[in-house]
Amino acid sequence: MLRFKKNDLYVEQVRLSDIAKKYGTSAYIYSKNKIVNNFENYKKALGAKDGFICFACKTNSNGTILKLLSKLGAGADTTSGGEIYRCLSAGFSSSKIVYAGVGKTTEEIEYALKSKIFMFNVESFEELDAIDKIASKIKVKAKISFRINPYVNSSTHSYLATGKKGAKFGIPYENAVEAYSVAKRKKNIVIVGIHSHIGSQILDIGSFRLVAQKIKKIVDAVEKNGIKLEYINCGGGLGISYEEGQEAPSPKQLMVELFRIFDKDKKFIFEPGRSIIGNAGYLLTKVIYRKISGGKNFLIVDAGMNDLIRPTLYEAHHEIVPVKKTNAKKVKTDVVGPICESGDFMGKDRMLPLINQGEYLLVKCVGAYGAAMSSEYNSRPLIPEILVDGCTIKLIRKRACNRDLLANEI
């Protein structure tokens, strides 16, 4: 939803420089219509198939964005008690909330059961025991799927891969059938499906196909033992295009591949996050200083690694563009932040025009794991979040101030 009008860059119908003047920088900006379109693409791809699309709210847990998605009919993929609380507060139906994560605490499990969530994605035998025990204590039945580690090493950053052998996630592939046999004997457990998730920012449909084929073998083996698996939870992980020329599969391409592998009577759950919110979010930042050091050009901006840690943490690439067209000569430039760390950068060796001090840059595709992973490192207050809908600007998280840094200290 980005485009130039004459010399100014716009998000939908709003000029970015106008947002900077009104709300200051740095700031996160989201395109409402891009979020809606991305989610609707999943709904259309699911079509007449029974099941639902659960937004992976760890990617972006802003209450306004969660409310938007809940109104569109999304379910929620949660990984903590706090995320369950956020999603319930945003209007998600508890019957569409799925709870994943390797380290669910006793308190979180009890809260989830009392909240009547749809199901748990169970990741260990001891977790299964804990859920059964807590369900017995509060006299309810717990619906579960097992998250199976299929031993598929997806082609993504090593920190984003979750389905390879030796990962902390899921039930080991060779123990999957045994896990269902154990669960069948639990008095307070109701088995409803099977789950697998192999990582994030995956651009190769072949990885998803291989996982589905391996999971189908488990489904067949479990059902031969008299355990019906109603839901196939395919997880999330579909990537987006971060760089020019990078191609990302569509939800339809993904689902066509998976639907043909499983029986027609199965119901499906998908848990996309990045592919719904990632390319709908932007980080607007201002050039504070320019300098040349050791033969390198630097643009020092007011966004730091505390605002956007992905380039530092994952060596992630985000396109960076000026918000005004210019004919200035492009030079190789490092775009760096004000944090006292050499790892504090938005992008290195980028071909950017020589822009003036005080002008603005836009960092693209930061809707996922941008604001959600931000922090107050270097005692820098959290920056605002803004939702653009056509020509309307809505502040959805105010800019914190220095006083907020001390709010919870005693």
Image: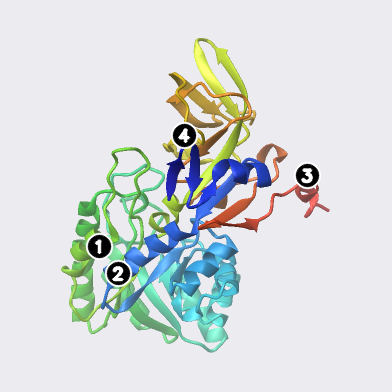
The amino acid sitting under disc 1 is Lys
Q: Position of residue 405 (x, y in %)?
A: 76, 47
Q: Horizontally, is 347 left or right of 88 in the view?
A: left
Q: Nearer the viewer, mark 1 or mark 4?
A: 4
Q: Residue furthest top?
A: 295
Q: Which residue is mark 4?
A: 321
Label 2 – label 4 distance at C-alpha:
32 Å
Residue shown at the point (51%, 87%) measured from the top left: 140
Discs 2, 3 touching: Cβ within 8 Å: no
Q: Which residue is mark 3?
A: 402
Quick check: 202 above or below 354?
below
Residue shown at the point (34%, 59%) measured from the top left: 197
Task: Say which label, 1 or 4, has the lower sequence index.
Answer: 1
Discs 2, 1 touching: Cβ within 8 Å: yes
Q: Horizontally, is 152 left or right of 410 in the view?
A: left
Task: Say which label, 2 or 4, has the lower sequence index.
Answer: 2
Discs 3, 1 touching: Cβ within 8 Å: no
- Of residues 8 and 84, the one drawn nearer to the viewer in this rendering: 8
